[in-house]
Image (cartoon, rainbow, N blue to C red):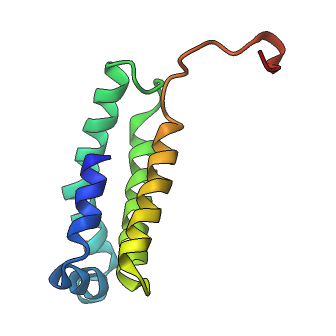
Amino acid sequence: MAGAHELLVVCARPEVQRIIHEAPTVLGASAWRKLSARYGLGLIQAALRSEMEAGAFSPRPVDPLAHLIMGALDETTRYIVTAADPATARHECLQALRQMLEGLKRPTSAPRPGGGPA
């Protein structure tokens, strides 16, 4: 979450907003995707592995999950820089991202048999 927060704060900078808007067109979608993967995907994979090894996240295949999170972050940056109120958009996106990542956490207690309430 700390890394995602910093990414979304940096997106508020005008020079970064310009890059987010123009780079995919200037570089081409494939080159932009490679850069995104090179500089972001590895960090996400490492963070996921670390959380799983620490027992905070339930074990699952890291690579597809990292790609899903990377895609969410890519779209989130574009959403924020085009929003009428970028500060509110950033706040709402961080809340949504936090909720998404909370879903990866290992349950703290075993579910009751039959799935009913306690």
Residue in the foreground of this view, choosing between 90 and 22: 90
Residue in the foreground of this view, choosing between 25 and 52: 52
Query: Where residue 110 appears, x then y in whole percent?
Result: 63, 12
> Residue, x 40% and y 24% (percent of image)?
56
Q: Is residue 27 above or below residue 68?
A: below
> Residue, x 50% and y 23% (percent of image)?
106
Query: Where residue 37 appears, x then y in whole percent?
Result: 27, 58
Q: Is residue 81 left or right of residue 108?
A: left
Residue 34 is drawn in which quadrant? bottom left
Residue 79 is drawn in which quadrant? bottom left
Residue 70 is drawn in which quadrant? bottom left
Query: Where residue 90 appears, x then y in whole percent?
Result: 38, 68
Q: Is residue 10 left or right of residue 105?
A: left
Query: Where residue 118 appears, x then y in whole percent?
Result: 77, 15
Q: Is residue 14 above or below residue 104?
A: below
Q: How many marks?
A: 0
Q: Is residue 6 above or below residue 79?
A: above
Q: Is residue 63 above or below residue 93?
A: above
Q: Is residue 95 left or right of residue 39?
A: right
Residue in the foreground of this view, choosing between 23 and 6: 6
> Residue, x 44% and y 47% (percent of image)?
98
Q: Is residue 80 left or right of residue 107?
A: left
